[in-house]
Image (cartoon, helix red, strand yellow):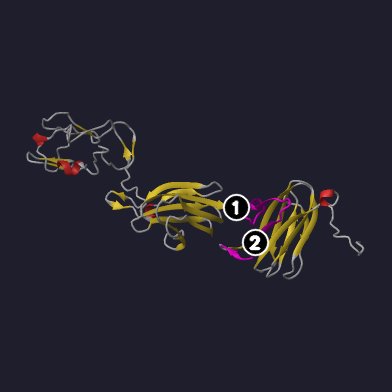
Amino acid sequence: MEINSLLTTVELDAIHTDNDLFSTPGDKIHYSDSSEPVLLENYLTLKDDINSADDLFLSQDSLVVELDDISRNSASVNNNQGTDPITGESIEPRSINNSDNSIKTATNLGEISSEKLIKKEKIGFKEGGKRDKYDYYSFTLPEDTEVSMTLDQLEKNANLHLFDEDSKTLLEKSTRKGKKTENITEYLDRGTYYLRVSNVGQAQTSYRLNLESIPDDNTIDGANDLGKLSNKKLTAKEKIGFKEGSKQDKYDYYSFTLPEDTEVSITLDKLEKNANLHLFDEDNKTVLERSTRKGKKTENITEYLDRGTYYLRVSNVGQAQTSYRLNLESIPDDNTIDGANDLGKLSNKKLT
């Protein structure tokens, strides 16, 4: 309840301070707790009273309060930033609008790095008589990276929009029907970006917003882990040479692990343009083997490798843009009975 509206027409002799004016330690208004005529002391200006045209106008008929932003919840005066002459404490102006309903007041999620950032909120409910239809968030990227933004744990329909750092240009949106998870995955340049969560129609729902950067497979440190290579073939389908953000994707790195010493066949096929294949040792620096055939011919590396982790690099040649398939398989060791070479069925023909 605002004191401004409460005291504009209250008779001086009828003020009950225990109901109409109240104070907590540190407040700038002091009073005597009685129903007698009230003396207001202004602790900020060090005057005995504020019954003047500058501070507070008092008349026998009415009390006119000219103080700003006194609320029943805080019982404090919103002063300009400065120092309290009594306590010596710094006075900070109280923020009136904490709403994230506009892009100018977006909640800052901070810098997105390798750790996932999670925000839980709700949308579509009433706030102060108005329906909360939009929640805006800002986040910053310290470097160019691919970012995954997910809106999940929905009870009703809600949408997700991504805006450029100018806060106006819509880069991408996810508007699936019902309470399905919304996702935007986008390669973004370094800078600040904005997200908008919005309800659909009159929908009211809680939600969880997840943001995380995706390791860049253009470097060996961000290599895609294909996992453990055993009896089953490992396959990856991707493309190379296309633009990601403002840069051309020239390298895709992969890692794989061998649980034991074995011979491995690595094939790069289904090429539309020229691409090459390189195999690196587990120190991720030493090139063990390469396949650099011309044109769109299949590339292959077959190598006997010790147990451990190894790295592969797929690269385009020149400005070539192509999709590809990468296949890895272990070749059974014929030095053991389990890896014996099958010569087939022996009949009338000699097996050689």
Q: Nearer the viewer, residue 194 or 340?
A: 340
Q: Nearer the viewer, residue 92 or 229?
A: 229
- Work out which residue is located at the far front of the displayed protein and give it: 348
- Is residue 240 on the magenta stretch? yes
Indicate the quadrant containing the N terminus: top left, top right, bottom left or bottom right: top left
Q: Residue 103 falls in which quadrant of the image?
A: bottom left
Residue 65, visible in the rendered structure:
no
- Is residue 21 on the magenta stretch? no
Q: Secondary structure at mark 1?
A: loop
Mark 1, residue position: 215
Mark 2, residue position: 237
Measured as percent of width and height from the top left, residue 173 is found at 46, 61
Q: Secondary structure at mark 2?
A: strand
Q: Amino acid at mark 2?
A: Lys
The residue lying at 40 percent from left, 56 percent from top is 157
* Residue 128 falls left or right of residue 115: left
Q: Nearer the viewer, residue 277 or 262?
A: 262
* Residue 151 falls left or right of residue 224: left
Q: Amino acid at mark 1?
A: Pro
* For discs 2 and 1, the disc positioned in front in the rendered view: 2
Instruction: Estimate the spatial distance between the alpha carbons at disc 2 and disc 1, rounded to whole Å.
Output: 17 Å
Residue 211, visible in the rendered structure:
yes
Measured as percent of width and height from the top left, residue 241 is found at 64, 65
Measured as percent of width and height from the top left, residue 225 is found at 66, 51
The residue lying at 56 percent from left, 55 percent from top is 145
Precedes in sequence: disc 2 or disc 1: 1
The region drawn magenta spans: 216-244
Indicate the quadrant containing the C terminus: top left, top right, bottom left or bottom right: bottom right
